[in-house]
Amino acid sequence: MSKKKKIKSGKNIRRKVILPTMLALSILVVGILATNVTAANSNYPPIVTKIAQKFNLNISDVQEVFDDERDERRAEMFARFSERLDELVSSGEITSSQKGAILDKHEEMQNKMDELRNLSPEERRDKMQSIHEEFRSWLKDQGFENLAIGPFGHGFKRGFGMGHMMGESQ
């Protein structure tokens, strides 16, 4: 083979094999990096992102499942809370209007807690403490400080300090 043919065949190989391969690899790497950057910059919790990536699912669908589950649990907790207030009304410890005020305050506190979702853990902890203090103060002002009620579990006497989960009944 002459030198010219060898040079020409080398250029052909480069054009036909190496360049398309390099281009395909470059596109693949950019796609992977873009996916990782998008997932890292999303507002989704890490567990949602991990599940979506591991099972090749749409991240918004996974988040929807988490949101639905949270809403169901919240509805169950609210139902138990309302039942507890009904018991307090039946026993004469509070009036129906006080029950209404407590439910209104509970909803207000729940909305404030919902706003904490996108904060860092440290900011969330600090804001949660502030909300907790606000609710404690409201309870005291209303004369309810001895009742085991509120969006923070079993009131302030047995809540998280005793290892109870928020809203669990004994």
Image (cartoon, helix red, strand yellow):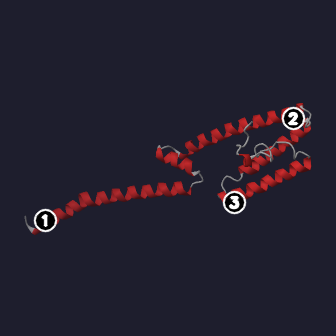
Q: CA distance from mark 1 to mark 2?
A: 95 Å
Q: Residues within 10 Å of mark 2 (few under 14, many from 20)?
A: some
Q: Residue at x 78, y 57 (%)?
A: 130
Name above or below for residue 86 compared with residue 116.
Answer: above
Q: Residue furthest bottom?
A: 3
Image quadrant where residue 102 sits:
top right
Image quadrant where residue 170 sits:
top right
Q: Which residue is mark 3?
A: 123
**Mark 2 or mark 3: which is in front?**
2
Amino acid type of the residue that numbered disc 1 sits on in the rendered structure: Lys
Left or right: where 118 falls relative to 13: right
Amino acid type of the residue that numbered disc 2 sits on in the rendered structure: Leu
**Mark 3 or mark 1: which is in front?**
3
Amino acid type of the residue that numbered disc 3 sits on in the rendered structure: Glu
Q: Residue at x 52, y 56 (%)?
A: 38
Q: Quadrant of the N terminus?
A: bottom left
Q: Which residue is mark 2?
A: 88
Q: Quick check: marks 1 and 2 in contact, CB under 8 Å? A: no
Residue 6, numbered circle: 1
| First in sequence: mark 1 vs mark 2 | 1
Q: CA distance from mark 2 to mark 3?
A: 35 Å
| First in sequence: mark 3 vs mark 1 | 1
Q: Residue at x 91, y 37 (%)?
A: 93
Q: CA distance from mark 3 to mark 1?
A: 68 Å
Foreground residue among 8 and 115: 115
| First in sequence: mark 2 vs mark 3 | 2
Look at the numbered disc 1 and give the secondary structure of its residue.
helix
